[in-house]
Amino acid sequence: MRRKIPSTTALALFESAARHQSFTHAAQEHSVTQSAVCRQVAGLEDFLDVKLFRRTKRGVLLTDAGIHYARRVRARLDDVERDTLEMMARGGTGGVLELGVVPTFAAKWLLPRLGGFQRQHPEITVHLSSRTRPFLFAETTLDAAICAGEAGWPGTQSSFLMDESMVAVGSPALVTPRQVLKPADVQGLPLLQMSTRPYAWRQWFASLGLDVAGDMAGARMELFSMAVQAAIHGQGLALIPRFLIEDDLAQGRLVQLTRHEFLSDRRYYLVCPEQKLGNGMLALFRAWIEAEAAKYRDGCRLAATGECGAGESQSLRQSSSIFVRDTVP
């Protein structure tokens, strides 16, 4: 059955005219006449049986339907252009993996390691796109996704990567002058709060068997990146996922209050739709990221138990405990 698809020329000229809100500018962009743009857009409107533009004395304006359709067409044309450039660049060899990611996890944990995979498999290009809300693989072009939450989506297989290990940190200027922090000292220090996790500090203290007054008081921030910067500048103590602050710990901008790490209710998984499991490139990536996650978990375990030897990384050695776990007086 023949597809109900208008010509790509008409779509490209319509998208350009919609973007510029001008047939003249669209004609200049595509090196055609203004009348050619008018004919193509009129033909597209006839094909759809929908008016996309309103003609006015000052030019053309998109209708509501035109605005909606232009957004969809632009996204599809961007996809076609990206795939075309990829094919041209590789001459038909190699392949591409489309990976959805949690932005902070990708920036702080995945990207610093991804070069290792690319060196092992230079024929594979990994594209990353942000995914912060629930979605269906069938509605995307994704081959897999790294998600924070629960495993076991219907029709998928999940590989556990890591827990979200929350560590309590502060600026050396705020923490180290006291040499040893007791719960009473913490009560006298500002606690930076996350607006999305209002009970985080209470849960952290409870995991140590402590009941600390004022555990929900303090400046509230929406993003972990804000809390990290506030902690670095001595504005308070913060509870942050370890993978976000490894560099800050290694370089001494932050110090960890205790080796105790609180596991939040979030876990990170690589989630693969079942219909993609036969993809050889995905199998290579899956094996690589599972191995990298295992190494990371082992390193965190050594740091938490104090088993690091002389050959361990500087960031692990500097995660020292300065918090005494006694009860509140």
Image (cartoon, rainbow, N blue to C red):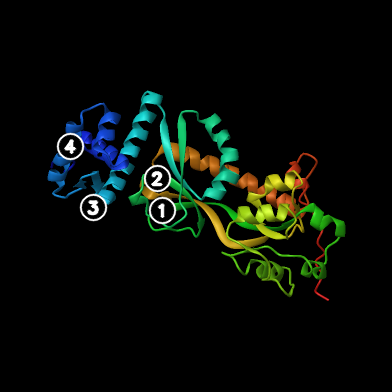
Q: Nearer the viewer, mark 2 or mark 1?
A: 2
Marks 3/4: CA–CA distance: 18 Å
User: At x 75% / y 57%, what residue is drawn?
Assistant: 259
* Dot in front, 1 or 4: 4
Q: Secondary structure at mark 1?
A: strand
Label 1 to label 3, Cα distance in Å? 36 Å
Q: Secondary structure at mark 3?
A: helix
Q: Earlier in the sequence, mark 1 or mark 3?
A: 3
Q: Which residue is mark 2?
A: 142
Q: CA distance from mark 2 to mark 3?
A: 28 Å
Residue 66 coordinates in the image, percent (x, y): 24, 49
Which tag is nearer the camera, tag 2 or tag 4?
4
The residue shown at (56%, 60%) is: 266
Residue 232 is at least partly visible in this image: yes
Horizontal and vertical percent position of residue 213: 73, 75
Q: Earlier in the sequence, mark 2 or mark 3?
A: 3
Labelled pair 1, 4 in contact (Cβ < 8 Å): no
Look at label 3 and name its amino acid: Ala
Mark nearer the N terminus (3 vs 4): 4
With respect to residue 280, does 70 lie above or below?
Answer: below
In this figure, which residue is indicated by the disc labeled 4? 38
- In this rendering, the answer to whether 144 lies above or below 324 is above
- Residue type for callout 1: Thr
As shown in the figure, which amino acid type bears the numbered disc 2?
Leu
Residue designated by label 3: 65
Query: Which of the two labelled residues, at mark 2 and mark 4, occupies the earlier sequence position?
Result: 4
Quarter of the picture containing the C terminus is: bottom right
